[in-house]
Image (spheres, rainbow, N blue to C red):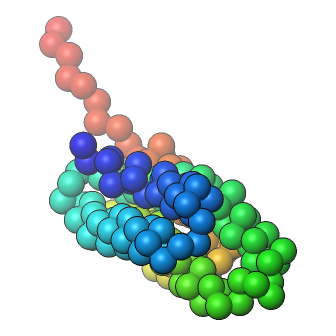
Amino acid sequence: MKKLPLLALLGMPYLVLALVMRQGLSAACLELTAGIFAGVVLLNFVWALLAGRLGFSARQLAFWAMLLKICHIPFYLLVFAVGVLLNVMIIPLLPFMAFMDYLLLLSTSLYGIRALWAGRRQGSLSLTAAGVCTALQLLFCLDLAGAIWGWVRLRKADRSAPQPQSETKN
């Protein structure tokens, strides 16, 4: 249940794309897709802010941020290709497309940023590392590098942390 908004964010761009391809660029379709998009993005903004209370560890959040970003690459490439191929006809939609792309980037980056600062509070990341990686999370293309780097650092920190030993009775 706690992963449902993450899964919705994972599939939402492709659902929106399928709706637009099936119904065209009619006003009703654009309103429907904008509503779906806004609902899922807003839900994930709130979900990312509550992630610590929901039981997500820094490493889990970093993994989800990385996974979401990797799974959204084809969507970003398709939006870019449509913009390049239909550049004259799509000019009125370019601001809308850019805004949607950046909201999608922010919704996935918020999980990464929460993971980075949770890792910073745990002592797994330095202040400089968390700050630089946070800045990377807010930039197109570099956000994926920041998400992967953050997840790797948090995973290494978890593996190098001393594990609690179970007590055995003799």
Query: Does residue 80 appear in this view?
Result: yes
Q: How many marks?
A: 0
Q: In the rendered view, would you say 22 is above or below 92?
A: above
Q: Position of residue 118 (x, y in %)?
A: 34, 66
Residue in front for this viewpoint, 130 or 64:
64
User: In this image, 158 relative to 136: left or right?
Assistant: left
Residue at the spot x=20%, y=23% of the render?
A: 167
Tell which residue pokes out farthest to the left in this image.
Answer: 169
Residue 135: where, in percent of width, then height? 55, 83
Measuring 80% from the left and 88% from the top, which residue is drawn there?
A: 88
Q: Quadrant of residue 31?
A: bottom left
Query: In this orientation, which residue lies closer to the viewer: 135 or 96?
Result: 96
Residue 98 falls left or right of residue 130: right
Q: Residue at x 62, y 85 (%)?
A: 93
Q: Where residue 129 sits: x, y (%)?
A: 54, 75
Which residue of the protein is positioned furthest toward the top in this rendering? Answer: 170
> Between residues 100 and 112, which one lies in front from this camera angle?
100
The image quarter containing residue 153 is bottom right
Q: Position of residue 62 (x, y in %)?
A: 46, 58
Residue 137 visible in this rendered orientation of the protein:
no
In the rendered view of the protein, which quadrant contains the C terminus?
top left
Identify which residue is drawn at 33% across, 54% down: 5
Is 141 on the left or on the right of 116, as rendered? right
